[in-house]
Amino acid sequence: MSKNIAVKVDDLTVAYNYKPVLWDIDLEIPEGVLMAIVGPNGAGKSTLIKSILGILKPIAGSVEIFGMSYAKQRHLVAYVPQKGSVDWDFPTTALDVVMMGTYGSLGWIKRPGQKEKKEALEALEKVGMLAFKNRQISQLSGGQQQRIFLARALVQNASIYFMDEPFQGVDATTEIAIINILKELRKAGKTVIVVHHDLQTVPEYFDWVTFLNVKKIATGPVKDIFNDDNLTKTYGINYKVSIQE
Amino acid sequence: MDIAEYIRLVFSDYTLRTITLGTAILGAVTGMLGSFAVLRKQSLLGDAISHAALPGIAIAFLITGAKDSNILLLGALVSGLIGTFWIRGIISKTHLKSDTALGLILSLFFGFGMLLLTFIQKQPNANQAGLDKYLFGQAATLVESDVWMMTIVTGACLLVLLLFWKEFKILLFDADYTKTLGFNTKFIDILITTFIVLATVLGLQTVGVVLMSAMLLAPAAAARQWTNSLGMMVFLAAIFGALSGVFGTAISATQNNLSTGPVIVIIAGIFVLFSFIFSPSRGLLFKQIRFIKNRRDLQLHKTLTFMFRIAETHENISHPHTVKILNNFQGFTKRTLQKLVRKNYVKLDGNMWSLTEEGFKTATNLYNQQNSNDE
């Protein structure tokens, strides 16, 4: 495969206290894939994303984004944190949260203006939330809050998107809306990396998958490696998932 | 003394003017910064800072032997900052939770400060009297230079708020995300924290170590009830804080010897109480009213739907039925029936009722809505 490598992780090891959460992870994610990171609770899925994004400091290892350090390539990367990681009673509106996606390109002190507002409104429209732009964020449903987070990342107009459980606690309609946006991103040549819980939907939603349980179990195209063998290795129990051929 | 006379006095009397200005500015700056502390869930930080400042006051006195308030407050600032950054250190380096770290530093520093105060009081030095006023504050000791100091700090605080508004907002809402955008979150964090310490220390002379945290929390908590915008919240908190200062001073000045600090805090508390009850969107009163109204509406709609189903069985929807049937419906009362009559949904004729055209239309809509919701 002659594709560029979007994200390259070398020997990444992360520990919170004494116990390593991630051990010696090597990972290459090709450009343009829609990838799921799967693994049991405590497997280090979120930690992996957070370490790649520099939120957590790894004990060892390095991360490259398109061949350069993350600090230099930050503008190419967007992040959708877990919905539960913020206080939704914060006094602000949906539009305001989406505008935050422009803060990175604005840099210090400079305030967002008409151009940024226009971008934010476009992103809100893409996720079908334009009608809610002036809504206080606590008055949004869980699925709507997730869409707002997604819109905030879309505003960043990045090449690589990291998403931490975007389907958690959303209804079926929102799930379909979100996956359609992710597929559109892939169609536009973007790389999308998603921490995912629902094994049933992996073959349907994703074309690339990484099995993780502290160590990397396997990574590759869904059609080649999403099988009972790897699932059993990752989850430690006999797993049977019927995959539609 | 009537109000007009008091207002004239505020403008003419030097002492009263100084104290009123001082407490108003103090209330404004602590209100603004308190909003950030409250939104960061660091409400107790103010309490820890003010208590941690006490040993600094004592040490500054021991070193200089003078009671110049600016020097004492400098000491308070240094020890307040040390305490605050120890708290941060404890939280990040150990497994202790933030409330434990706050409590630990608060009592440790306060204990040490009290120790120093008693030591100073044993000294054969006539100058030492009055240091303990920092425990509960004494607004009467405010002089013009203190007010200038407060004005300068408030000005600096406003400038920093305006410059770094976007950075403060995003850090408060989502710190991890802020980091991924390339902002130095540690710098923003230290900037906010330093200003919170500065404002807290500034209030020690007026309100005192023990009550200072209320000046940070109360205006912010009250302001949160009235708005869903961060900018408005900070603005309102500043207004509530300033008004607490002005009213508190007025009450303590007109009532003999009521201590100013506690009165200001009580006024701020009244703002909180009022806001918790009467805020239109978040207040308890309107929440309860909305709750009851919703229940009533639902009950009415349920009854109407029940009547609709009975009327439906007849070809003529206006065919009268006996009121007795309705007794089978749980939740039916005479009052609901009267209400339905008043709304012209139902006609009552003796012991018989019948749906009106309008009632039938409304009920049809409700019925269809309910069915589509069930699907």
Image (cartoon, rainbow, N blue to C red):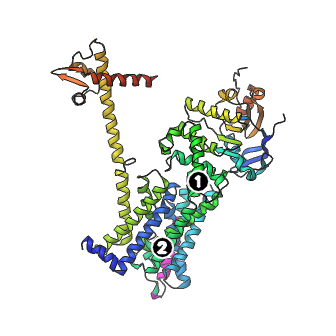
Q: Quadrant of residue B90?
A: bottom right
- Which residue was labeled with disc 1? A112
Q: Nearer the viewer, mark 1 or mark 2?
A: 1
Q: For mark 1, does the 10 Å Cα neighbourhood hold few (<14), some (14 to 19), or many (20 or more) residues?
A: some
User: Is residue B163 shown left or right of residue B272?
Assistant: right
Q: Which mark is residue B151?
A: 2
Marks 1 and 2 sit apart, C-alpha to C-alpha, by 30 Å
- Work out which quarter of the rendered image holds the N terminus of chain A and state it: top right
Total number of numbered discs in the rendering: 2
Q: On the picture, is B338 further left or further right than B99? A: left
Chain bearing mark 2: B
Locate residue B272: give its quadrant. bottom left
Q: Can residue B338 be seen in the rendering of this structure?
A: yes
User: As displayed, is residue B66 above or below residue A161?
Assistant: below
Hey, which residue is sitting farthest front in the picture?
Answer: A114
Residue furthest top in the image: B315
Of the pair B69 and B159, the residue shown nearer to us: B159
Cβ–Cβ under 8 Å for marks 1 and 2: no
Disc 2 residue crowd, few under 14, some 14–19, many 20+, Cα 10 Å = some
Foreground pick, B143 / B200 = B143
Residue depicted at 49% across the width and 85% down the height: B123
The magenta region covers B106-126
Q: At x 77% / y 34%, what residue is drawn?
A: A218
Quadrant for the C terminus of chain A, please: top right
Q: Give me the disc on residue A81.
A: none
Which residue is found at the position 70% from the left and 29% from the top?
Answer: A237
Q: Amino acid at mark 1?
A: Pro
- Name the chain letter of the residue that bears numbered label 1: A
Looking at the image, can residue A37 be seen?
A: no
Q: Position of residue A232 (x, y in %)?
A: 73, 29
Depth check, front residue: B302 or B343: B343
